[in-house]
Image (spheres, rainbow, N blue to C red):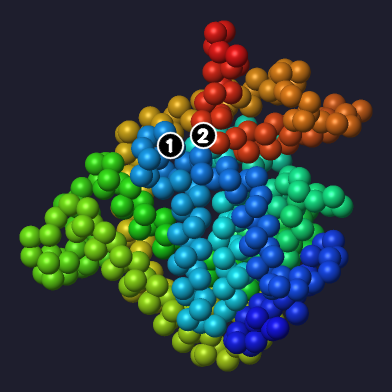
Amino acid sequence: MNFEAHLAPYAARSATSPGRSHAEAAPDSRTEFQRDRDRIIHSTAFRRLEYKTQVFVNHEGDLFRTRLTHSIEVAQIARSIARNLMLNEDLVEAISLAHDLGHTPFGHAGQDALNACMKNYGGFEHNMQSLRVVDKLEEHYGNFDGLNLMFETREGILKHCSALHAAELGTIGRRFLTHQQPSLEAQLANLADEIAYNNHDIDDGLRSGLLTPKQMEEVDLFARHWHEVERLYPGISGRRAIHETIRRMINALIMDLIQTSAARIADAGIQTLDDVRHRGPLIAFSDSMFAEATILKRFLRENLYRHYRVNRMTSKAQRIVTALFDTFMQEPTLLAPDHRVTKPDPDPQRQAVKHARKVADYIAGMTDRYAMREHRRLFQVDEI
Ligand code: MG
């Protein structure tokens, strides 16, 4: 059965894909990209997303988004849009569910701290780490490391990458050097991520009380829908008003993205995936929606992500990550054997780089609560 027969000619397809690094027999009950999605869901890193911060640390409240619920929301949005554009839903779902697998504990604070720690050892980028998780770190299969995912899934996971790292990555990094675009599915997953976090961060920000609807009214995209909801449901208030507003915002962003992208694909005369790779980005918001979304992002940066209560957690998170890293760098014997370099390098500098990467892998894999516990185990004498 051809599950991909209905797709647009420029969609990614199992049959024409460069495939997997390790050859495997084709699956008989699903597409190659469904198989990727299934492997991601069964991975260890995926389960850890439940206990990793998006903006609010996991223990701050049960209703805030975690990386897991965020990833599921991204997949939902991406699939809706993909179906409208006749793109490969299975591929966008796989990319969406995997896009944050490499995130450290404590969100961006953790990633910035780990990147600073790794400055002299090759740095740390969460997109590259997500790829590293699916290519190398997962231990699920007898004859290869990682999940052995399809090229297009891996390409979508590697959303950004510095030129230096791109050169080291070989085929998968090449597009960053030749300035080509990834598949439409990868472009789409990237923007679905933005739609998801902008909207759920408003919801979580309002829920936490760090933001108020009054304050949000200075953002046109919010105010327009908020006022429409007040007009449609006189006297509406509280969570119901917020949810009615946010669902309208998500819908407006999705509809704009579908219409703008469909027009751009048609205008550019795109026929094949190869055409996609040689054009500029085709999945995009209209200029006016892009401008509004940019204002919203700036608002969230200034008022939520840099709120003093978020800053306090950010600061603690950076101290925890830095302390863990420094301690493990100075005293490798505190690490369980699994997290140590198995074949020490005779060259001290190369050995330090190898060791640092093992430490970074260990820390990046930690959930928020595991990192806090590990910190207590190392620094509090009565914690074992
Ligand atoms: Mg994300």
- Against 80, residue 275 (above or below) is below
Vertical side of 200 occupied by 288: above or below: below
Mark 2 or 1, nearer chain start: 1
Q: CB of mark 2 within 8 Å of CB of mark 1?
A: yes
Residue bearing mark 1: 57
- Give how far across and how far down residue 204 sits, in percent: 33, 48
Hey, which quadrant is residue 19 in on the image?
bottom right
The answer to whether residue 165 of the structure is visible from this angle is no
Which residue occupies 69% across, 65% down?
Answer: 35
Tell me if mark 1 has few (under 14), some (14-19) or many (20+) residues whose alpha carbon lies within 10 angstroms of its own. Answer: many
Q: Residue at x 54, y 45 (%)?
A: 49
For label 2, the residue is 368
Q: Which label belongs to residue 295? A: none
- Which residue is most to the top? 381
Quadrant holding the C terminus = top right
Position of residue 276 in the picture relative to residue 236 (left or right): right
